[in-house]
Amino acid sequence: MTDLDALERDLLAQVEGAPDETALEGLRVATLGKKGSVSELLKTLGAMTPDARKTWGPRINGLRDRLQAALSLRREALAEAALAARLAAERIDVTLPVREAPEIRGRIHPISQVIDEITAIFSEMGFAVAEGPDIETDELNFTALNFPPGHPAREMHDTFFLAPDRDGRRKVLRTHTSPVQVRTMRAQAPPIRVIIPGRTYRHDSDQTHTPMFHQVEGLVIDKAANLGNLKWVLETFCKAFFEVDSVTMRFRPSFFPFTEPSAEVDIQCSRKDGEIRFGEGQDWLEILGCGMVHPNVLRNCGLDPDEFQGFAFGVGIDRIAMLKYGMPDLRPFFEGDLRWIEHYGFRPLDVPSLVGGLTG
Ligand code: PHE
């Protein structure tokens, strides 16, 4: 009968060593299940003589009882251990600060913010948004805008030229958003009232210039749009954008091949210790170029200058962003430094509007 004792020791050791509830259940089925080893032992009792059964009955039943007890003890221990592990893993420290969700932590780049602000202001004035590609043909960037081939004004723009194509034509990274004036006039009939925000490129780099920068072009074409309207639009825009009752602007006569007459507009500011402040001081910062659309440009777009006229302007977005938000250097705008964007960026859910406030 040492066999039975050995079997019991072995089974109890297996129960003790069962690593988890699944293994334990497997062990139960293998011993006490219908065809389990201990169940089979119990079945042998029926065929025994009464004497033998007297001896073996209590022993085998005893083995079954002790095995059952051991199984349920082990099951309880395993369940407790599993619960404890889960509680430890899922523990929440309610004293920790709440981690902000990505849509709360993320920041809108000042350029995107300012483009949204500009769009909100001009759409209130009835302007639609138009767009064009960054890689532009020489024809649209220059020729159609009344820059004759070889004209020195092309040099003014420090153009990035692409390698010539098979026909020897070189595309350019657009040096201004003005080619989209041509695209718009060729695509839709007047009256036209659009703004065109976008990236522009020139070979230039210092504190207020980067090789890639942003402009917003404005174009109004109808039968009567005049310089007075242009001035009003620009002043209204500047007051709304800078959120002030009056702005000091200076219109200087200038030259652009695609406008006549032309002007450059400066805005009053102070520049102390490299910091640009708007609304004070004796300095001027050039923020835009403008003028009446040149008759040659209208003709190049299939419009009769005796019937249609209009004005255009091109505003340096980066410049007015720096002015409005007191950012002294343009270069970090495009360096992708998280610390900078955390400091100067805007909250994503504060969408600018004239009604709700441009800057939240
Ligand atoms: N395209 C000009 C520039 O980039 C700006 C401008 C736009 C001037 C529209 C007049 C009219 O300098």
Image: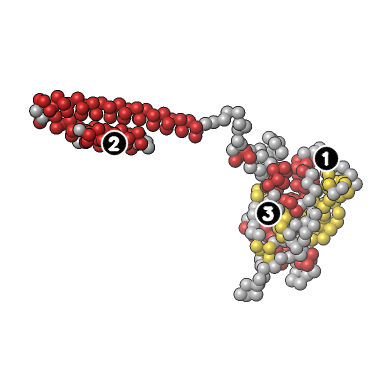
Whether the residue under disc 1 has CB within 8 Å of ligand 1: no
In depth, the one of 132 and 33 nearer the eye is 33
Residue type, mark 3 in image: Gly
Whether the residue under disc 2 has CB within 8 Å of ligand 1: no
Q: CA distance from mark 3 to mark 1?
A: 27 Å
Identify the residue at horizontal 74%, vertical 51% (top origin): 332
Residue placed furthest toward the bottom: 167
Residue type, mark 2 in image: Asp
Looking at the rendered structure, the number of numbered marks drawn on it comes to 3
83 sits left or right of 152 in the view:
left
Q: Which mark is residue 246?
A: 1
In depth, the one of 311 and 169 nearer the eye is 169
SS class, disc 3: strand
Q: Which comes before the other along the chain, label 3 or label 1?
A: 3
Q: Which mark is residue 10?
A: 2
Q: Are marks 1 and 2 in contact (CB under 8 Å)?
A: no
- Percent coordinates x, y for residue 297 in the rendering: 72, 62
Identify the residue at horizontal 62%, vertical 75% (top origin): 167
Report if residue 187 is visible in the image. Answer: yes
Q: Which residue is mark 3?
A: 198
Q: In this rendering, which labeled residue sits more in front, label 3 or label 1?
A: 3
SS class, disc 1: loop
Label 3 CA crowd tier, 10 Å (few <14, some 14–19, many 20+): many
- Percent coordinates x, y for residue 307 in the rendering: 71, 57
Say which quadrant the N terminus sits in. top left
Q: Are marks 3 and 1 in contact (CB under 8 Å)?
A: no
